[in-house]
Amino acid sequence: MNRIALIGTGLIGGSLGLAIRARHPETEVACFDASGDEAALALARGAATHIAPSAREAASGAELVVLAVPTGAVAEVLREIAPVLAPGTVVTDVASVKGPVVRAAREVLPPQVTFVGGHPMAGAEKGGMAHADALLFENAVYVLTPEAPGEAEGAAQTQGVGYTLPIPPSPFDRCPIPPEALWLVEAAGARAVRMDADRHDAVVASVSHLPQLLAVALVQHAAQTGDDALALAAGGFRDMTRIASSPFGMWGDILGANRDAVLGALDAFARGLGDLRAAVSAGATPDLREAFGQAAGVRDAIPSHSKGFLAPLAEVTLWAEDRVGFLAGVTGALSDAGLNIKDMELLRVREGAGGAFRLAFADGATADAAIGVLRARGLRAERR
Ligand SMILES: NC(=O)C1=CN([C@@H]2O[C@H](COP(=O)(O)OP(=O)(O)OC[C@H]3O[C@@H](n4cnc5c(N)ncnc54)[C@H](O)[C@@H]3O)[C@@H](O)[C@H]2O)C=CC1
Ligand SMILES: O=C(O)C(=O)Cc1ccc(O)cc1
């Protein structure tokens, strides 16, 4: 790819820019952001090769245009750049809601321009270029919502691109994905999943937008219970509420753009919570046991390394000691043995009492070799 335009260089645009520049240093990346400071930081951190004076000038002459602006700003930027897009240009976005964006693109863009909705399923609770990270999308699912003219409506299927998803194959591959969009996903280190825009919105209402509201409600509820409640909050509460620190600006847009699907998810969830309440109230142990069993089965089937439901890596649990240099010793020993840690996660931490890490390796043989190295240092390590 010779030239791309990056419009919006906050957390997501900046992270895409960093990843693209790391994998494709030859590609020219023209950026524009409504905030001059964000664009300047993007240039300084190497997420772009130059700053354009407007979105229109960034887009002019680009083969691929990436819009990484707030959900509510996508239509306006599409309208602004539409007149300068050359035939054959591919335009994509990263907004968290796809139906309204795809419909705006259909309305605003000239027919010789291809729009592919995009949504990388990874992010953070802090926005802005200052928090951008070249590795943010590594192994993440990246949803693409391509359309073939006249065929998009009702094609509510999902499909992995180039690997197997646990979802049945479908005729949705009638809608080709332009290679420029796949190039972007690969540059991000992510994995493309093709999906219908409205189905995407229903799914993210359940797995992203509802959890965001629940995190807010949980923290509010605990705060109302009292300061002593927050003092007692352990790892489980932290796991469930990290995203309560997310900025409202972004979420206000998302909840507005996906209102109907979010209301549907909230209603279904409220019914489920009502069922659990009734079971607790009635002391219905078998019902509760069944609910816990079902949930554990589903939760345990999510491969933790991939930020999504994709082929698993080989994983090791390492019990940690709360002492200076513990982690440096572990990573140093594995590195000395030539063993590459593909992913690492702190599973639980009890301040002053150590915790446990999940380490992921490319294959079982590497994981077993790592266990050997760790045990030789007197550490407790087991295959997960
Ligand atoms: N933050 C997250 O975890 C994720 C966010 N998204 C989506 O990505 C998009 C961007 O989100 P973030 O990067 O987190 O937000 P951000 O606030 O970090 O960055 C957005 C940038 O767009 C700029 N901007 C706003 N209006 C503009 C306009 N009209 N023209 C040019 N620049 C404009 C802002 O100045 C800001 O720098 C949103 O649609 C969001 O829903 C998608 C996946 C994850
Ligand atoms: O911080 C996290 O873990 C997230 O899940 C962030 C996130 C926010 C919005 C999205 O559309 C996708 C991902």
Image: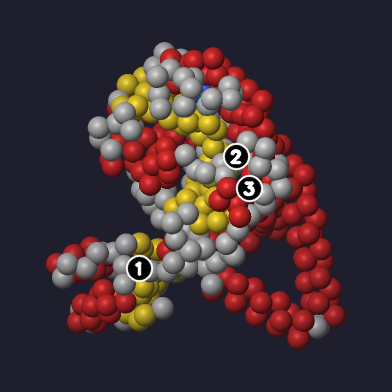
What SS does tag 3 mark?
A: loop
Of mark 1 and mark 2, the one earlier in the sequence is 2
Quadrant containing the N terminus in the rendered view: top left
Q: What residue type is labelled 1?
A: Ala
Q: What residue type is labelled 2?
A: Ala
74 sits left or right of 306 in the view: right
Question: Quick check: is the Cβ at mark 1 less than 8 Å away from ligand 2?
Answer: no
Bin the neighbour count of mark 1 within 10 Å (Cα to Cα): few under 14, some 14-19, many 20 and up: many
Mark 3–mark 1 distance (CA, rounded to whole Å)? 32 Å
Give 379 or 360, whichever is nearer the viewer: 360
Tell me the SS state at disc 1: strand
What is the x, y in percent for residue 142? 49, 49
Up/down of 300 relative to 229, above or below: below
Label 1 sits on residue: 360
Structure colour scheme: secondary structure
- Identify the mark at residue 194; answer none if there is no mark: none
Residue at position x 78%, y 66% in the image: 272
Which residue position is annotated with label 3? 196
Q: Is residue 18 above or below residue 213?
A: above
